[in-house]
Image (cartoon, rainbow, N blue to C red):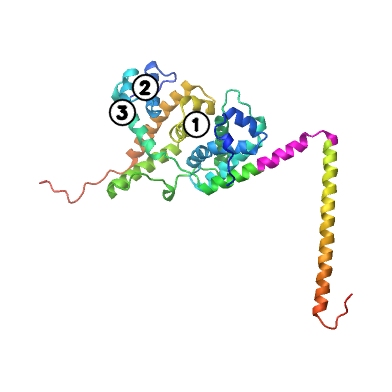
Amino acid sequence: MASLSPSPSHHDQQIASVLTGYVDGVAPLEDLLLRYQVARHEVEDLIELSDDLRAILIDVLPSPAFVAQLYDALVGQSSAMTMWNRVQAMPPRMKLAAGIGGITITAGVAGVLLITARTLRNRFDILNRAETPGKAIA
Amino acid sequence: MMTPNTDYEQADETDLVRRAREDGEAFGELYRRYVKKIYNYIYYRSNNHQDAEDLTARVFYRALAHIDSYTERGVPFSAWLYRIAHNLVANWHRDRGRRQILPLEDYVTDGLAGEAPEHHVESQEERDSLLAAVQNLPEDRQQLLLLKYIDHLSNAEIGAIMNRTEGAIKSLYHRTLLALRDELSRSRSRLPAEAPPDDLDPAD
């Protein structure tokens, strides 16, 4: 049985090397025992325990749907952050110009939408009155 | 799923991290390389898929948010991710105020289908006992076992994550196995002794 001294003895370190080498698949157990001059009975129970751990601690895969959704969310967010970072990094004059330009474009688009909506509403009203006899057409 | 940029599949990690500050697809490649390992690690610390998914997502969102501040300085990107994961899981446990024992219905079994039922039960109990013993270990020892057995990391890689030397990890691993062995011996000694079967025929 290995000791638990605060400063591991040289032999404890040899045993630790065998155990690590075994779990990392560095070499067959017999080779490790020979290399580090450790008797089998000194590590046999810990090797069995290592095998048991390997049997129970197995890969648990995430669902492919989760992996895909998170990928899309991260890459999309990253692109948005990059755009934001680029705007933040602009000189003040350019940022102001970009802001004014953005407002202008937004106002223009909003105006077009309003005009279109009013036109459509007027046409709808005309059609509605035409289908309803007796109502005056404006 | 968005189609990953194949140009990044063979890219060096240092180059990828640098590009990830400007290019979302570069970060996506980093994510693709590490999501399963991080998920695995978190699953065994949280014991259910929902929390594992939530925590995994938080790891990568946090990494994305702080990618600009990451500098290698001897700590690989993967080690940085694991540190984020470890801290998030530790905070999660603290907030919940308890450690969860893996529910049997979530337990992943493998290779037992061909065994006789009584042997299957005995193996299942032993596995449950060992898993419970692992989950009762101090956090650093749990982390070491998960990184070693789930993610198959070397002592040097684990040392970079846990901010310890390779030799310290080797020694810690040895002490962890000893502690586990002792804990299992104690738990087995607490079990009631089995009664001999009634149908045993002394003439056999």
Q: Which residue is mark 1?
A: B140
Q: Please state the extent of the stretch shown in magenta in the rendering.
A: A77-93
**Secondary structure of the residue carrying numbered label 2:** helix
**Where residue B47 appears, x then y in whole percent?**
48, 44
Q: Which residue is mark 2?
A: A15
Magenta span dominant secondary structure: helix
- Mark 3–mark 2 contact, CB under 8 Å? no
Does residue A35 appear to the left or right of A78 in the view shown? left
Residue sitting at the far top: A10
**Secondary structure of the residue carrying numbered label 1:** helix
Q: Can residue A100 be seen in this snapshot?
A: yes
Q: Rounded to the nearest whole Å, what is the CA distance between mark 2 and mark 1?
A: 21 Å
The chain identifier of the residue carrying mark 2 reads A
Mark 3 is on which residue type?
A: Glu
Residue depicted at 51% across the width and 25% down the height: B159
Q: Rounded to the nearest whole Å, what is the CA distance between mark 3 and mark 2?
A: 11 Å
**Where residue B182 appears, x then y in whole percent?**
37, 32
The chain identifier of the residue carrying mark 1 reads B
Residue depicted at 84% across the width and 44% down the height: A101
Question: In the rendered view, would you say B173 is above or below A100?
Answer: above
Mark 1 is on which residue type?
A: Asp
